[in-house]
Image (cartoon, rainbow, N blue to C red):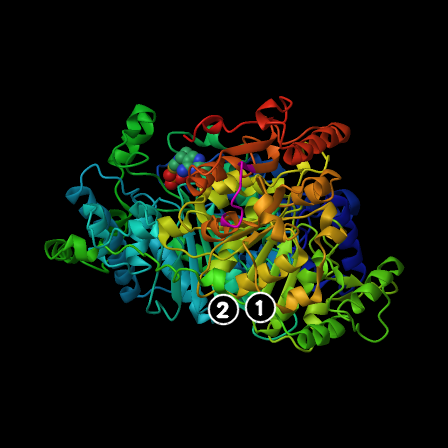
Amino acid sequence: MTLGPFGGVNAGYVVELYERYRQNPESVDPATREVFEQWTPTDAIASDRGRGVQADVHQIVGAANLADSIRRYGHLAARVDPLGSEPIGDPSLSPRAHGITDDDLKALPAALVGGPVAESSSNAYDAIEKLRRVYCSTTGFDYAHIFVPEEREWLRYAAESGRFLPPMDREGMEMLLDRITEVEVFERFLHRTFPGKTRFSIEGVDMLVPILDELISGAANQGARHTIIGMAHRGRLNVLAHILEKPYAQILAEFKDPVAARTLRIDLGWMGDVKYHAGARTSVPVGQTYVTMPPNPSHLEAVNPVVAGMARASGTIATRPGAPAFEGASTLPVLIHGDAAFPGQGIVAETLNLSRLAGYDTAGTIHIIANNQLGFTATPDESYSTSYASGLARGFKIPIVHVNADDPIACLEAARLAWEYRARFGLDFLIDLIGYRRYGHNEGDEPAFTQPLMYKKVGAHPTVRELFSQVLIDNGTITAEAADLLVKKHFTVLEQAFASLKPEEDFRPPVSEPAPPGVAARTETGVPLDTLRSINKALMTPPAGFTFHKKLERGRERRAALLRNPAERNIDWSAAEELACATILADGIPIRLTGEDVERGTFSQRHAVFHDAENGKRYVPLQAFPQARASFEIHNSPLSEAGCVGFEFGYNIQEPDRLVIWEAQYGDFINGAQIILDQFVTSGCSKWGLQPSLVFLLPHGHEGQGPEHSSARPERLLQAAAGINLRLVNCTTAAQYFHLLRRQAALLRSDPLPLFVLTPKSLLRNPAIASTAQELVEGRFSSVLDDGDVGVRARGVKRVVLCSGKVYVDLMTSERRHAASDVAVVRVEQLAPFPVVALQEVLDGYPSLRDVVWLQEEPENMGAWEYMRPLLEELIADRCPLRYIGRARSASPSEGSSAWHQLNQRAIVERAFDLDSHPAESPKVLSKPARSLTGSKR
Ligand SMILES: Cc1ncc(C[n+]2csc(CCOP(=O)(O)OP(=O)(O)O)c2C)c(N)n1
C-alpha cells in the first residue's frame, strides 16, 4: 500500500522535492510524481516562484499531516462507548490545526492522503472524510506504536481497505442475530429462574461470543486444531454454554447445587469449586477445532500464563530427539481480560513479556478486554494510569483495536483482523471490546449505590440484540415477528432443559481417580552400569572442533572418568542430574527445564549448554547424544516467577507425558509465584480434578548468606500438603536425586503429583553428598535413610535425631558425632507425603529410646517442624518424648551475619549429640522443648 507521500514532513522538504520534479519528473518516486502531476501551483509561481510554491506547499504538507494525524490519533475521536460518552478527541484531527481549510483540501489531489481510500476519492477532502469513517467511527485503530514497518503497513491497509469487513449476506445477518439472541436469552432465563444468584452476566459485552466464534473458525481455516480460552468470571457461563458446548442441563444442575453422596468424593480430597470457575473441553470439534477452557481461580488474570503454557505445549512436538519443534499455528490461545484487572495485575505484564521469547512464544495470543468500563465498583480513573485499559499492551508492540460492543459488524471486523494478523505475523493482538455491565458486579449487587448516573443510562439502554434486530428490521432483512420468534425459540430450549432436569445426575464434578496406593514407593529406578557408561561417554563427546572454555575442561575430564570404578564416591549432584535426564530421555520421555539462568545454573554447576570459546556456538549435550528417544529443551527464563511458574504449570497439564522442571534462582523467590502454587499447583486437583506433575527445584539451606537466600519456605508448601496432593523432598545424596527424578518421570501417568525438591547450594560439589555409580545402578528413591553407622549398636541408641536436608551434613561432619554412639541420625528425605511406614520401621529398630528429636536449622515457626510435630507425635505415641532442636521462633528466616549463623549452627549440632543437656535447658535462641511434650505425652 502507499500512503500519501508527504506523511509527517515539513514544507521545506516538499519545496525541494517539487524543484527536483520540475527539473526531472523521473527523479522523484512515483507516489510523489502522481501528486505533483495533479497539482497546479498558484500563479505566484510564475512571478515569484519561491514564495508561491511555499504557500501551496503548506497546504500540501497540512493535508498530508492531517491524514497522518487521523491515522495515529483517530481512535481518540472514535465513538467506542455504547453509553455515548463524548470521545476526548485531539486538536490534530482538525484541518485548522494544520493551517488548512476544507476548501483547501477540496483543491488538493486525493493521492496526498494515500492508501486505499485515495483510490476511490476525487480530491483530498473526500479521501480525508473516508479516512475519518475508518478511524473515528465505532472502531478505534490503535497501532501507531508498532515500530516494524511491514506490520504497521499491513495494519493500515487492513483498516483502510475494509477488506476485513466480512461480506455478510442476508443469511449471515440472520445467523448473527440468532447467535446474539441465544446469548441474551440464556442470561435472561437464568435471571428469571434463579433471581439474585451470582452468574456474572455477560450482558453489555454480549458480542464476546460471536467474536469468539469468528476467532475460532478463522483460526481453524488457517489450520488451527485447538483453541484454548482463558477467562475470568464475567460471561464465563455463557461462553461455557455456547462456545464450549457445556450442556444447559449441567449448568442448570450446578445452579441447583445438589449435594449428592454419589458425586461427593471427599475420600479423594475432592472439594470442588463454584460454577463460574469451572473449566471445560469440547469433545467434538467446534468449527473443526477442539476448544479447551482451563479452570480459573478467583485471582484475576492468574490464568494468563497457564493458557500460554498450554498453548506452547499443545503446539510443541517433543517426540524426536534434539530440540523440540514448535508449530504455533496449530493452537490458538485466547485470553479474555477484565478492564480493571488487565492494567492492575502484574501477572499480565509478566505473561505479555513471554510473548516473543524463545521457548515461550505462542505464535500469537489473541487478547480481548471485556471492557464494561467498571471494576467491582472502581471507575477507570481509579483503575489505571494509562489512557485506555489496554495501555500496557502498547509497550509490547501489540496492535489494539477499541471497538464499540453495540456494533456487531465492527466487532466481527475486529475479530477477523485479529486472527488474520496472528496468522500473518504470529504475534499477539488485542481487542478492547467496550461495552457496559447491565447489573452490578454480581447479580445481587446494587450498582446505582456508586454509579447512579451510569446506571440510569444502562437502565434505558437497549440491548445489542434489540439494536441489531432493529437495524435488520429497518433494512428489510427480517420482520419484527421473526426477531421475536428467535427469542421464543431460545427460551423454549432452556425451559425444556430445565423441565427435564435431574440435578443429581446432571451434576458432574471432574473427579480424578487416585493412583493405587504405594506405587511411588515401589518404583524401581536403577539403570544398568553399561547403559550409564555408554550414555556418559556420548554426553562427553562434543561435536568435532568444539572449543570449551578453559576453566570447564578439567570438570569435563573428571566427568568422563566418573563411572570407571562403580564403588568410587565421585558422582556429584549435577552429574546425577544430567545422567537422570539422559536416561529419562533414553526411555522416551521428553524433558523441559526452565528457570532463571538454568542453562549454566545459578551456581555454575550445570553447564547444560556450552558456548564455543572461539565462535560462541551452542552445544547442548542432552540434545545431541544418540541414545535419546525424545526431545530436550532448556531455556533461561525471564526474571519472572508468577508468570513463568504459571506457564510451566499450563505446559505440564496440557502435555502430562513430558517431564517439566522449573528451577528457582534461590528457593525463596518462589514466593513470587505463591498465587500459582496456591490456586493451581497444590489445590488444582481438589478443586478441579487437575493432576499436575510439575517439578520445582528450590535451592534451600542455611549457609550464612542472610535471610533472603536461605529458605525455600518449605513450611508454606507443607501447610498446603493435605492428603496426597504434592511431594516435598529434601534429599541428601546425588543418588537420591537421580532416583527421585527418574521416579517422577516413571510416575507421570500412573501417579502424577507436583514435586518440590529442596536442592543444595554449597553442597552441590561437596563430597559428603556424592554417590557411587553402584548407587545409581541399584535400587530406588528412599523416603527415609537410617543411620548407616549405627548397625549392631542400635540397641544402645538412646536418641534418634530426625532431620532433613543439608543440616544432616553438618551433623555428620561434627566432631561430636564420633563420641555420641548413643545417638542415631535419621534422614527424612521425603517430608510429604509423610513416610509413615518407612519411619515406623526405622524407629522400631531402636528399642531403647529416651527421646526422639526433630532437628532443623530453620526457625521453629518455619521449616518442617510444625507439620512434622503432630504426625510424629502420633507415630511415637507414648514410647518417649518428642523434642525440638533448632532456631527459636523468628520473623525472619535467618541471621543476617555469617558469623552469627555459624555460632547458632554449631550450637544446634552440639545439642543434638548432648544427651545430658536436656533441650529445654538449651540457650534460649536455639532450642525449646516441644510444648506439649515436656512432661507426659499430650
Ligand atoms: C487478584 C484479585 N483481586 C481482587 C479480586 C476481587 N474482584 C473480583 S471481580 C473484581 C473487579 C474486576 O473488574 P474487571 O477486571 O473490570 O472485570 P469485571 O468484573 O468488570 O468484568 C474484583 C476487584 C479478584 N477476584 N482477584
Q: Where is residue 221 in the image (x, y as percent from the top left)?
A: 44, 71
Does residue 888 appear anywhere in the picture? no
Q: Residue furthest left?
A: 499
Residue for point 60% across, 76% down:
629
Residue for point 42% across, 40% down:
874
- Mark 2 or mark 1, earlier in chain: 2
**Of the numbered discs in the image, which one, if any, rests on residue 330?**
2
Quarter of image, ligand 1: top left
Which span of residues is magenta-colored? 844-853
Is residue 100 shown above or below 368? above
Q: Mark 1 points at which residue?
A: 590
Q: What element carries label 2?
A: helix
Q: Of the residues shown, which amino acid type is indicated by label 2? A: Ser
- Say which quarter of the image contains residue 92: top right
Q: Does the magenta stretch include residue 849?
A: yes
For label 2, count other residues whose C-alpha is less than 10 Å away and answer few (under 14), some (14-19) or many (20+).
many
Is the stretch drawn in magenta largely helix, strand or loop?
loop
